[in-house]
Image: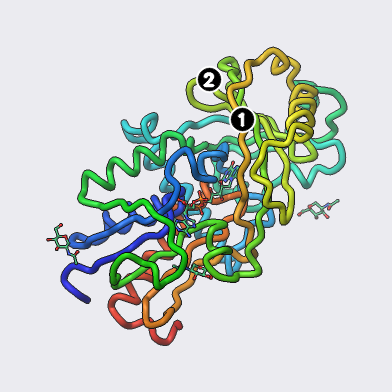
Amino acid sequence: MADTPNIAVLGAGVVGMTVAKLLQDELRHCNITIIADSFKDDTTSAVAAGIFRPGTSFMGPTDKATKKWINNSWYYWQEILKSSEAPQAGLMAFSSYIFSKTHYNVTRNHLIEDLVPIYRAVDKNELALCGDGWKYGSYFSTVKIGCERYLPWMERKFIEKGGKIVVGKIESFASLPEKYDLVFNCTGIGAKFLCNDHSLVPMRGQVIKVRAPWLKTAFYGDYDTYIIPGFDGIATLGGVRQYDSYNLNVCKYDAAAIMERCCDMLPALKKAEIVAHKVGLRPHRVPVRVEPELINGVKVVHCYGHGGYGVMCSPGTAMDAISMGLDLLKGNAKNKL
Ligand SMILES: Cc1cc2nc3c(=O)[nH]c(=O)nc-3n(C[C@H](O)[C@H](O)[C@H](O)COP(=O)(O)OP(=O)(O)OC[C@H]3O[C@@H](n4cnc5c(N)ncnc54)[C@H](O)[C@@H]3O)c2cc1C
Ligand SMILES: *[C@@H]1O[C@H](CO)[C@@H](O)[C@H](O)[C@H]1NC(C)=O
Ligand SMILES: *[C@@H]1O[C@H](CO)[C@@H](O)[C@H](O)[C@H]1NC(C)=O
Ligand SMILES: *[C@@H]1O[C@H](CO)[C@@H](O)[C@H](O)[C@H]1NC(C)=O
Ligand SMILES: *[C@@H]1O[C@H](CO)[C@@H](O)[C@H](O)[C@H]1NC(C)=O
């Protein structure tokens, strides 16, 4: 390995920032440059509520890898949560109800039931907590990561430790500004346009950010309805999940439907002030791609395609990507390529 490897991380969303920072912590001597065309509030990551609750279809290359990503991510967030920096980092612990009118099982979650401190079925009284007609439900404790705080916090720490940031769009490998010993590809849905990964599909999401400082618990209902508390009293109301849609404009019909579904659950939201409407394209791919590749002789580790779960799972996937990257640098990963 070169004494001071020159490393580029493409992408400054939650995945790129986490890869860059963890890598910096791991390597004593290295030059790491983050290259991206959007940062902080302009990324998909900043649209997300950032709740730690994987969809049951979230999938790595194997069940074992999936579980490992989720487990490592959970403990990464717990570590920050228990530190004095938790609020600056955007970490918040709370509990959530998930209700359904049709099936008990859709309120279960085999990926986190044994991981989070509480995951249990609700009782009759709880079913009557919000809205009418809920038949089934579960209650669980979890955390959320507010990217509006996490991304600036990580960026500050990264720069303090000598990390560099370059603003720019990368059209192809040929347009990388210099020669790098290793490149991490954390471009989210951008990976689709960099070349042709046909298995990466945008899953459009839209949310409403409202002022609801009284809200301390998250609620999920059927049809992708969710209400998630956040920092500064700003809650996230959702949502939609539109497969293969590239529309980045706010759709007023989606907004109306989201508002109606959420107000059915919690009528108090009717009077909440709307702070913003936001749209993002979840980089959906089955499985999520965390994989080394030699492209025109350049050592690349891909880390993209986290779909609707990239905030919660960024640390676990970053750890795997980094260990693949270090193997590549040491030159002992030939058999894996
Ligand atoms: C409505 C909604 C709700 C969500 N809720 C949650 C949730 O509760 N929990 C959760 O875990 N996840 C949630 N997600 C999913 C989460 O937002 C994504 O999985 C995550 O943001 C993906 O992060 P990323 O870093 O891969 O991508 P991004 O945040 O999109 O970052 C990609 C980065 O790559 C850069 N880039 C791309 N292409 C290029 C290029 N050619 N040249 C230079 N730079 C480039 C971009 O500028 C950007 O900096 C939600 C998503 C949406 C839309
Ligand atoms: C790496 O950074 C150091 C100082 O931080 C600098 O002296 C050196 O030239 C850099 N190397 C490369 C390859 O950019
Ligand atoms: C989960 O991660 C923690 C912390 O990294 C580790 O100590 C523990 O062994 C892991 N558990 C499983 C089941 O992988
Ligand atoms: C619900 O899950 C349990 C345990 O995983 C399974 O045995 C049962 O068949 C499921 N029920 C339905 C209706 O899918
Ligand atoms: C990132 O991944 C995509 C999908 O495989 C690929 O087309 C693109 O060339 C990669 N870009 C870089 C710079 O690694």
Residue 64 quadrant:
bottom right
Q: Find the distance from the CA under tag 1 to the CA under tag 2.
A: 10 Å
User: In the image, residue 137 lies at what x, y percent?
Assistant: 76, 35
For the point 74% across and 40% down, the residue is: 224
Q: Is residue 114 left or right of residue 224?
A: left
* Residue 218 appears anywhere in the view: no
For the point 79% across and 31% down, the residue is: 257
For the point 72% across and 46% down, the residue is: 241
* The C terminus: image quadrant: bottom left
Q: Which residue is mark 2?
A: 233
**Secondary structure state at the residue bearing disc 1:** strand
For the point 77% across and 28% down, the residue is: 256
User: In the image, residue 189 lies at what x, y percent?
Assistant: 57, 57
| Label 1 CB less than 8 angstroms from ligand 1 | yes
The amino acid on which the numbered mark 1 sits, given as a three-letter code, is Thr
Tell me: residue 117, above or below residue 335. above
* Residue 128 appears anywhere in the view: yes
Q: Which residue is mark 1?
A: 236
Residue 57 quadrant:
bottom right
**Secondary structure state at the residue bearing disc 2:** helix
The amino acid on which the numbered mark 2 sits, given as a three-letter code, is Gly
Residue closest to the eye, 243 or 245: 245
Q: Is residue 293 left or right of residue 167?
A: right
Residue 198 quadrant:
bottom right
User: In the image, residue 202 lies at what x, y percent?
Assistant: 65, 55
* Mark 2 crowd level (few <14, some 14–19, many ≥20, 10 Å Cα): some
